[in-house]
Image (cartoon, rainbow, N blue to C red):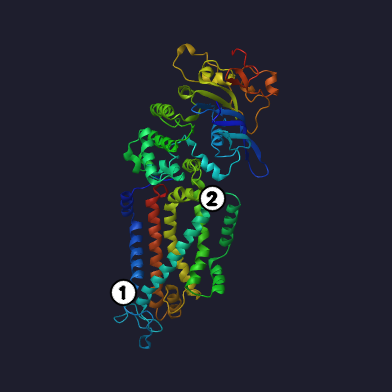
Amino acid sequence: MTALLQLSGVSKTFRVGAAGRQTDLRAVRDVSLDVHPGETLAVVGESGCGKTTLGRVMLRLTPPSAGTLRFDGVDITNIDAKARRELARDMQIVFQDPYSALNPRMKVADIIAEPLVNLGMSRAQVRERVARVMETVRLPIAFADRYPHAFSGGQRQRIGIARALAVEPRLIVCDEAVSALDVSVQAQILTLLKQIRADTGVALVFISHNLGVVRFLAHRVAVMYLGSVVEVADSEALFTAPRHPYTAALLDAIPEPDLSMRGKRRVIEGDIPSPLDPPPGCAFHRRCPLAGDICRKEPPPLEAKAAGHEAACHFAETELP
Amino acid sequence: MTTAAISRSDFWLRFSHSKNAVIGAIIVTIVTLAAIFAPVLAPQDPGKVSILFTWEPPGDRYTLGADALGRDVLSRLVWGARVSLLVAFSVLSITLVIGVTLGMIAAWSRGWPDSLIMRTVDVVFAFPEVIIALLIAAVLGPGTLTVIVALSMVWWPGIARMTRSLVLSLREELFVEAAVACGTPPWKIMWKHFLPNIISPLIVRASIGVGFIIMAEATLSFLGIGVQEPMPTWGGMIRDGLPELRSDPHLALAASASLGITMIGFNLLGDGLRDVLDPKGAR
């Protein structure tokens, strides 16, 4: 199966600091990932690990500093602005904050219609399509003439999803699409996404820090730490048999109402290192319970540890304490 | 940064509760109507010279008296309003188009166009407006067109700078990124996403700006490089009345009062609109 979106060796570096004393912030470091048609790939990690930047690079909202990006086999690493606009036909995004993501001065129908109008659809076609996607996300058509301020967070997120769905894209990047919502509303939106995926076969890149949500939705999961992917595996394999100590610690951090687990959690100590000054060797070694000498010197490559299960750890075979 | 859109009925309710806005609107309406209906309202021909009635004090024949040439002051005031508003609205339209366009381009590009536009703005700001007007008058010769060109030259940088700062904070909003992501071209982002969200502060600015443009127009006419005779202007009337300030104060005072009241009207309206349109910024 050919990949729908293929990232190879993608990095994104920002120049930060005052002029003259600039340093490189490597937000995304050498990431290679495939997203297959119809698949849901979750990207998880702590705040600041570069997952949002990775999402923006995937959509070519910002060009990568290094590496190549292919969509449907076509190199889109260095396309011009016009070609980028054409990509909107196939790739869309849903944002975390449903309050900032909708223009307060536009009516719901116009918000959802924006990508369609950009494609040059006729007014009748646009109206028909807007009505259809509003039905898909279960928004009453009567809402079409209202402004965003009249809606709750969950409803706004439905509007955002409707906008992304309108062009019938092949890939939607959901950047923390439910983390700003109440838990009950999260469940509704997740169920909706699942149903949309089943109905349309759209591929999703689901960026999240919430592993419970990820487990519910994802086929495959990529774990990011300090800009790099440290583990990629099928959802089931990752959740039941994590290979990377960071993943294991993340899984243990999922709150579970199980008293027998009390005191048995592996808690990672310390903070995520600064991407301005990454540690040598493995980025995780200062917080890792397994770390040995090699970890301080050599960064571990991301390599297959089992079929379809890759991890970047020198001690990935070792039983976790 | 973005305020929720205010519905129309809400707007009028809040407007009617703002004392500033209502008083300002009344003054502005009266001045505007006077300007529009000057030919009907003026009791006499503003240019009609009458040597029999030079320096006639206010009375039955001339409600506000007559000037050194026996011309009716009230008629000249009404026609003067016409000139002032014509200049003010021309300048405002020109500077809004130029200033908003350049301000948005500067904020959107953030590269060399930004530097070019904003450094030009700095240069224009560095010169007093009268100097620029004198320069332009030297090139074009005095007249109405000169006033409009000169004041537009002076006025667009402020609007450009304000637009730029508004757009800079707006472009961080996710809906702008969403627009980019769904393939909206830059000009459309400016037109559909930026403009509607910066229109309220611009309206406030424009309303207060009208008062100052009228003032600047009067200054130029006072100096003799503005609108020329026989067109009556408030600035020209103040200039002509000044030597007679002790003997016949009505000449200069009538025009000064009109100028002052009109400026207050536009300023009150602007302040009131700010309270109405941007509740967060109010007191």
Which chain's residue wears label 2? B
Residues packed near mark 1 inside 10 Å, few (<14), some (14 to 19) or many (20 plus)? few
* Residue A56 x/y as whole percent: 54, 36
Q: What amino acid is found at the position of numbered circle 2 in the picture?
A: Ala
What residue is shown with label 2? Answer: B107
Between A209 and B179, the one nearer to me in the picture: B179
Which chain's residue wears label 1? B
> CA separation, marks 2 and 1?
47 Å
Residue that appears at 53% across and 59% down? B157
* Residue B165 x/y as whole percent: 51, 50
Is residue A231 visible in this depiction of the protein?
yes
| Residues indicated by labels 2 and 1 sit on the same polypeptide chain | yes
Can you name the residue that lies furthest to the left here?
B60
Between B251 and A98, the one nearer to me in the picture: A98
Quadrant in the picture for residue A269:
top right
Residue that appears at 61% across and 52% down? B112
Is residue A274 visible in this depiction of the protein?
no
Residue that appears at 45% across and 47% down? B193
Q: What amino acid is found at the position of numbered circle 1 in the picture?
A: Val
Vertically, is A246 above or below A181?
above
Q: Secondary structure at mark 2?
A: helix
Can you name the residue that lies furthest to the top here?
A260
Vertically, is B34 above or below B105?
below
Mark with earlier residue (2, 1) = 1
Question: The C terminus of chain A is located in which quarter?
Answer: top right
Instruction: Judge left or right: residue B274 versus residue A225.
Output: left
Residue B40's tag is 1
Between B196 and B159, the one nearer to me in the picture: B196
